[in-house]
Amino acid sequence: MIPYNTAIVLAGTSLLGAGSGLIGTFALLRGRALLGDTLAHAALPGLCLGFLVWGERSLPVMLFGGLVSGIAGIAVVVFLRRFTRIKDDAALGIVLSLFFGAGLALLKYIQTHAVGGSRAGIDHYIFGSAAGMIASDVKLIAAVAGVSLVSVLLLYKEFRLVTFDAGFARVQGWPASLIDFLLMLLVSITVIIALPAAGVVLTAALLILPAVAARFWTEWLGAMLILSALFGAVIGAAGTLASARNAGIPTGPMIVLVGAGLFLLTMLFARRRGVIARALAERRSRRRMGEQKLLLAAHKLASPASSSFAFDALLSRTAASPQRLRSLLRRAELAGLMEPVGPEKPGEWRLTESGLRRAAGVTRAHLLWKRFFADYPNSVSLFADLDLEQIDRHLSSEMVAELEAKLRAAGELS
Amino acid sequence: MTAASLFDDVGQAFWTIAVAATANLACALLGCYLLLRRMSLLGDAVSHAVLPGVVVGFWISGSTSSGWIFVAAVAVGLVASFLIQLLHGFAQVAEDASMGVVFTSLFALGVVMLVQVGPHVDLDVDCVLYGLLEYVSVDTRPVFGLEVPRAMLSLAVVLGGTLLFISLLWKELKLVSFDPRLATSMGLHATLVHYLLMVMVALAIVAGFYAVGSVLVIAMLVVPAATGHLLSDRLAGMMAWAAVVAVSSAVLGYAGDLRFDTGMAPMMAIVAGAEFAAALCFSPRHGLVSRAMHRLGLALRIVTEDVLAMLYRTDESHERETAEKGVSRRRCLAAAGGGMLARLSLPLLWWRGDIRWLPEGRVALTAGGRKAAESLVRSHRLWEAYLGENFELPLDHLHESAERFEHFIGPALREELASELQQPGRDPHGKTIPGSAHGEREA
């Protein structure tokens, strides 16, 4: 049985993770992953001013102050980017450090001057203390997550359009700036709500990590949103449980570490975009290309079709290194495409029955592609990455027939 | 206050400012390269990511003031910038997102490790946020008989290394900053230069981190460089301005902290921010105010020239009878497009002696104004003639282009147009081009 306090924190962190995962997806795809970081830092002076104006620690007032100064910070970033020669990255850095510096000055002032000068409350916003979450905090988080969810459901099409092609949205007559502002507002509110739990530095991670991890699994926005929210919830819950088990380890950093672990696993093992999957795919295609190169050379050398040819002849024709050629031959032998002639002729190879068929196909495709690119040079870039032997899939049958006729006329193809 | 304690106070102030200025300078100079390469946020990322290195260094040596912390932190900083490149290049994560992933993860790792090392560590919150500026003059060490703060020693080494690095690799760094591809094609190892720069940045960050706190390190990496970027178009000039901001914010930050008691590091950030804002407004070339002034001047010139041209044309079409009667103020304002600037244009023209006031608020050209208007109308009609000669445009398309272009045709271009067209006397509409010998003969 989970203790009540832990249950509260668990609910809060997983809702927080889900909400920021959802909104973080848009931030990531819009190229604003680090905006959350700047926002979180820029919120500090507002939090302090909220405290100073209200005179005591009041969560809603301080959060509102933080929201206002965070948005003001973003406005400065937009202004610098739009009207001065300061670039994007520098603008983010300037706002982040200067607003945070001003916030620290205010914090120090509160520490030394304010009545009942406990700044412990505000300290928590810098490093975060999820463990101190109470039921009303969770209600606030749930409300924000709910609003985010409803907005995304209602404005899915609009958000998608603006995220992927704001210029197109504008041309189509959508109020792109308004939609963009709404998204930004959702990001800001999410960041501010996450601040007390995750702290200034790690809030950015809540926004980025689930979305980046989800990006590895899907190319479809809907799936990415669901996955990202799910990842966020899982990270939040798992991090909370891990820190509850190891007394003394703060929840916020633990959540981020769990998120980093999830990201690492995802990055390595994701189905198609993962590092391992991509490395395997690359190896496969390199092997296939090597095999095709070998068969092409063998087919050229093997005339009449069943005759054998020397290793050295293959070597000079394929322009591969001896080791590579040896490994290519070994694999071709395993695949039953080629075989050594035998002890009577050492170093001589020939194509098997099935190898001959494959080789003829490869040669035909090679000639057809060559002819195609010679006759239609403008289309080269369209077909640059395609597989050699799949020519009949990539080109129309009329086109293939035309090319074959041309090759036959030139006597290159039988 | 006794003389001795006064001396102590002055010494403390001097060393505090010196430490801060040294840390600022190293960061500001290197920040220029980061800014030019649009990698300012890398400084931010590295400054967060060094935390686990600091903890490991502490764990190895057991003290907060050891070289191990330096070494480990710089190493982790380098690893962080390498990981960011790796995620971006190899796993195809967007660059800013890979930065976000790496530095937050490493920071979280650092916090967890910090807790594991134990609560007795005096690596506390205030040290991370505000640095140890207030205490630099406590922890000293004699150098040539002078009590020098320990922080000063390491910072001086870092600053010296930075200066040496910049002066030795000035050309290479410049090339890589402005055009990495050209650098690579010229046989420079751009990646090597990049990682050397990263080593220096990590060193400056760790040294600065210790002295002035994490926030200020970021501020000093970005803000002075950005200020320099606004004030100069040359790398050396940019660095000089960045250095000015770095040092002055140390001095003024100290003074401000004395006055407002906000902590010196945040005060330095505020001072640097104010200096940046000032540069943003008043930079001679890129400032908002100077750009607005420039635009205002241009707008005024165009408006006054439009009024002059209108007066000239009215004179011309009414066979100079308006020269005595003048033109109503309302028509002048309409010619200038109305609005504030139009209202300003008439007094301005009068002040310059181009127009004179007639009774009932009417206006006429003076001799000087007539001359100015003549060359303007000459530009206008020459341009129309040129367009008509060289482009197949209908007659009613010529005027609008000339109306815009007339303001930007100087005397040199005017005469070139005239000689290109063999001194035409009339424009395509059949109007006389003023000032041409041919036209005058005809008139």
Image (cartoon, rainbow, N blue to C red):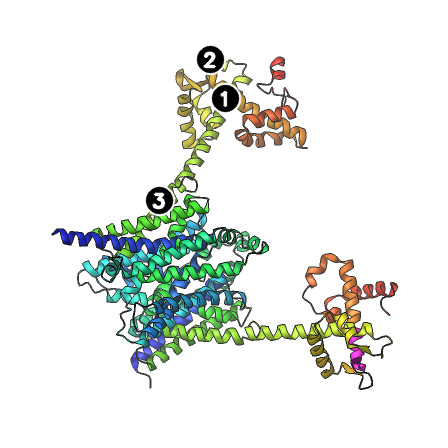
Q: CA distance from mark 2 to mark 3?
A: 52 Å
- B436 and B282: which is toward the camera: B282
Chain for disc number 2: B
| Mark 1 residue element | helix
Q: Is residue B374 above or below residue A257?
A: above
- Please report, as a chain letter, where disc 3 is located: B
B53 vs A150, nearest the viewer: B53
What is the number of the mark on residue B355? none
Q: Residues within 10 Å of mark 2 (few under 14, many from 20)?
A: few
Please provide percent x and percent y for residue B322.
Answer: 49, 15
Residue lying at 53% horizontally and 53% vertically, measured from the top left: A167
Which residue position holds label 1?
A: B372
User: Where is mark 3, residue-wise?
Assistant: B278
First in sequence: mark 2 or mark 3? 3
* Residue kind at label 1, given as amino acid type: Ala
Please identify the quadrant where the C terminus of chain A is shown.
bottom right
Residue on which disc 2 sits = B324
User: Which residues are the magenta region?
Assistant: A344-361
Image quadrant assignment for residue B120: bottom left
Pointer 3 with pointer 1, Cβ within 8 A: no
Tell whether position B380 is magenta. Answer: no
Q: Residue at x 53, y 20 (%)?
A: B374
Instruction: State the residue at coordinates (61%, 21%).
Output: B431
Q: Is residue B334 visible?
A: yes
Secondary structure of residue under mark 2 = helix
Circle 3: element type: helix
- Same chain for mark 2 and mark 1? The answer is yes
Residue at screen point 63% across, 28% down:
B386
